[in-house]
Image (cartoon, rainbow, N blue to C red):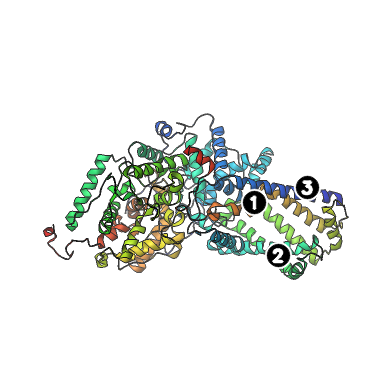
Amino acid sequence: MAKADFNVPELGESIEVPAIKEGSMAHSSPFVAKPQFQEALGFKGEIGENWKEDTLEAMGDLLGKYRSLQVYMDICVKCGACTDKCHYFLGTSDPLNMPVGRQDLMRKVYRRYFTFAGKFFGKLGIPGFVGAADLERDMLDEWYSYYHQCSECRRCSVFCPYGIDTAEITMAGREILARIGMGQKYDNEIIGKVYTIGNNLGLPERALADTLEGLEEDIEDDTGVQVKLPLDKKGADILLVTPSADFFAEPHVDGLMGYAKVFHEAGVSWTLSSYASEAANFGMFIGSYKNMREISLRIRKAALELGVKRIIFGECGHAWRVAYSFLNTLAGPFDFLDQKYPIPQHILEFTWGEIQKGTLNIDKSLNDDMTLTFHDSCNVARASRMGDKPGGQFVIPRNVIKAVCNNFVDMDPDTIHEKTFCCGGGGGLLTDDLMEVRVKGAMPRMQALNEVTQESGVTHMAAICAICKSQFTKILPYYGMTMDQIVSVHQLVSNALILSGQEDTDSDDEDDVA
Amino acid sequence: MSTFYAILFIVATLVLVIGVARRVYLYYKVPAPLKIPTTPAPVTRAGVVLRMFREVVFFESLFKATKWTWLFGWMFHIGLALVLARHLRYFMDDDNIFWPLIELIQPFGIYAGFAMVLGLLGLLGRRIFVDRVRYISAPSDYAMLLLLIGIGAIGLAIKFIFRTDVVAVKSFFDGLWVFDWQDLPMDAPLLIHLGLVAVLFLIFPISKLLHAPGIFFSPSRNQVDNPREVRHVADWARKLEE
């Protein structure tokens, strides 16, 4: 087991709702962005003397721009439906990690300064009677702490009778904090790298080209077939935009090789772009429409310059939310692309289409060493879709897995589909300075995985999100499991896909195949 | 005293109507710049209407969340709806086309009164005994439940114990519309019942009771899932494109 200087939750029979423990995660807080990184994104460098005016001004601005924020601040009735739904609450017992607790951090300030009731009882000196509170400096630290213990996964919004989505409040909270000079280091430095280099990892074009060449060699060594991973190829039909973790991290990279093999077998021309070499859009994490838009426009620009007809996104959760739900809004209209295809399209929609057409030669038995389960990524599940029908985001990945694997078992129904639990590292929390909340927040998913491991002999969990994959790789050992138990869905496809011209995989003399 | 109640009800009704209308206008005016329906979501407008119907009438999401809160909450709201319908007879005459319907509902309205109060007591119990719900409750949350319990319980008491002259009550409210002050029966239970109702009217537009109109403006519930097909840009966002 991995060592931790905090208590790792113990897995029991099933997920239990803990009794609240006030302040149990109050110490958790990520590093604050340095002024240079703040200013590069158009935010104030550091928090100043006018923090109160700055905060209220930013809040007023957002209340006028986002109906979600305005309505959600008003209509919560404190029914408690959400209180046991957040994985961070279940893993930490901290009541401020209950969705409504997190919302109330902002709502009490909203009530005090933006509503009649709060102003009235505030003047009487008892704002608390109506759930309002005067804004104090240390409340901003509390915001900073707890708005970085939310992965914007939207599980609470499924259960709220009014659909109140804490992700909207967290995004607003982070945007206000960023504007007043308290941005988060991890998110804001990464966004800076996208602007200057093109991807979250800061992988420059040369390094990217070398990496892709190496992957081509790996595939050839493995199969004897030359499969290209083209970069900046003008005139290609398809632009593939994928999270930069796919270029080198495990098991992401196995998924990338899977996409390449599928494209190869489908006989389509495709390319990656060095300028838009990042699918993830951290602008969403910090709630910044402006930054989210600028990052999205890079994809539009790359598509125009390369002259592609289609855009396909690789396996990535929040990226697919921005792509599916926001790209058309932020960077459209995409009238220059081929309108016959969804804009943008998910790689799984593409692969499932090819499987249905029968273009892929699959040998399912090649995955027989594994029994799989599938982790629905939160933002794919609750903030996007695949295919034509509602719920396609649940069906298509499972269809693909079942088409390439013989052994598949779903986890507890309360932990999949729209009720899926976040991996614990989403929404800008995938940073070492938040390790405790990441480990604890992963508890519900680890619990559900452990159950199917015990009962059905599941050996591996497939995911379709770069963050989920990175998070689980790191977190599984804390729970006594191994990091290689997490796999990419397209890694499974890759395993089972027999390329045209590839000699029978049972053969030992693969080297003879040219 | 009757004059005081007459003025109180006119003011309270104006506050309720104008206050809620202003709030609804605000919700309408503030744009939703991004498509954020909680998915899986309907892909057509008709589907959204159906989703909203299930949410408003059956409390679908709450049912998924917690059965006890759903049970108490639904009992209270459906009870309240029936009780309100029953009360329409104090504001309508028997030549109204809806009169047969209102007559039909009378006996149900009585059972509904009990259901409403029981539901409210259940909700109050959860607020007191479930540690998570207790943590998120402000004094105003208890006050609002007590207010509604007071209205319901006293209403039932008027029906079954402290009978009042309902004909006089009706002519009082009939008179209000045309500023013709009629006398209210000077029965304490009735005066308390009506006073609490007026308070409810007054706090409605400045409290969480705004969830009633607010839910229709909740983007996670009222948006169509079609962002790839339809471009959705808010006015303030369009300015960024210029």
Q: Residue at x 65, y 46 (%)?
A: A129
Residue designated by label 3: B11
Q: Residues within 10 Å of mark 2 (few under 14, many from 20)?
A: many
* Amino acid type, label 1: Leu
Residue designated by label 1: B210
Whether residue A29 appears in this view of the structure is no
C-beta proximity under 8 Å, tags 1 and 3: no
Across and down, in percent, residue A401 comes to 33, 63
* Amino acid type, label 3: Val
Question: Above or below — where is A132 with respect to B228?
Answer: above
Name the image quarter holding residue A482.
bottom left
Determine the secondary structure under disc 1.
helix
Determine the secondary structure under disc 2.
helix
Disc 1 from disc 3: Cα separation: 19 Å
Question: Above or below — where is A122 with respect to A86?
Answer: above
Position of A390 compared to B11: left or right? Answer: left
Q: Chain of mark 2?
A: B
Q: Earlier in the sequence, mark 2 or mark 3?
A: 3
Q: Residues within 10 Å of mark 1 (few under 14, many from 20)?
A: many
Q: Earlier in the sequence, mark 1 or mark 3?
A: 3
Disc 2 from disc 3: Cα separation: 25 Å
* Amino acid type, label 2: Leu
Q: Residue at x 13, y 63 (%)?
A: A508
Disc 2 from disc 1: Cα separation: 20 Å
Q: Residues within 10 Å of mark 3 (few under 14, many from 20)?
A: some
Residue designated by label 2: B82
